[in-house]
Image (spheres, rainbow, N blue to C red):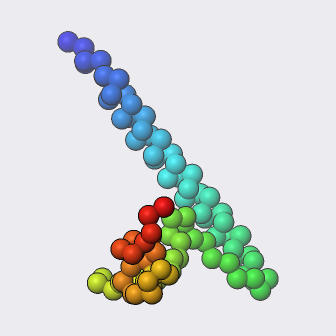
Amino acid sequence: MADPKPTKIEKALDFKAKYQTLMNEARDEAIASIQGQIGTLKELGFTFELVESGSRFSAKAPKAGEKKQRTCKICGKTGHNARTCPQRPNA
């Protein structure tokens, strides 16, 4: 008896796996090339760093339980702003 014909889902998953493998290999080749070029630049006195996108440095996040002190421009009290002021005139 012949092997059952693979379904379209199985084919798609197989193509996806092959695609991921090729992308990872291409990425590794590109990184190796870039790191070699960065090494050459370092020899010339330049400083560069290769950073993967999505790993950007961000401002320090507030600690848990730490609230930013807001001062209302309408009543001058802290704890809320003009947008949420209970004394806000209806417009």
Quarter where residue 45 is shown: bottom right
User: Residue 23: where, in percent of width, then height?
Assistant: 52, 48
Residue at horizontal 25%, vertical 18%? 3
User: Residue 18: where, in percent of width, then height?
Assistant: 44, 40
Which residue is at the far right?
44
Quadrant where the N terminus lies? top left
Q: Nearer the viewer, residue 86 or 67?
A: 86
**As drawn, is 24 to the left or to the right of 39?**
left
* Image position of 2 with respect to 25: above or below: above
Q: Is there any visible trace of residue 62 in the rendered image?
A: no
Which residue is at the far top?
1
Q: How many marks?
A: 0
Residue at horizontal 39%, vertical 87%? 78
Q: Nearer the viewer, residue 62 or 30?
A: 62
User: Residue 49: where, in percent of width, then height?
Assistant: 63, 76
* Image position of 62 with respect to 35: above or below: below
Quarter where residue 2 is shown: top left
Residue at horizontal 43%, vertical 34%? 15
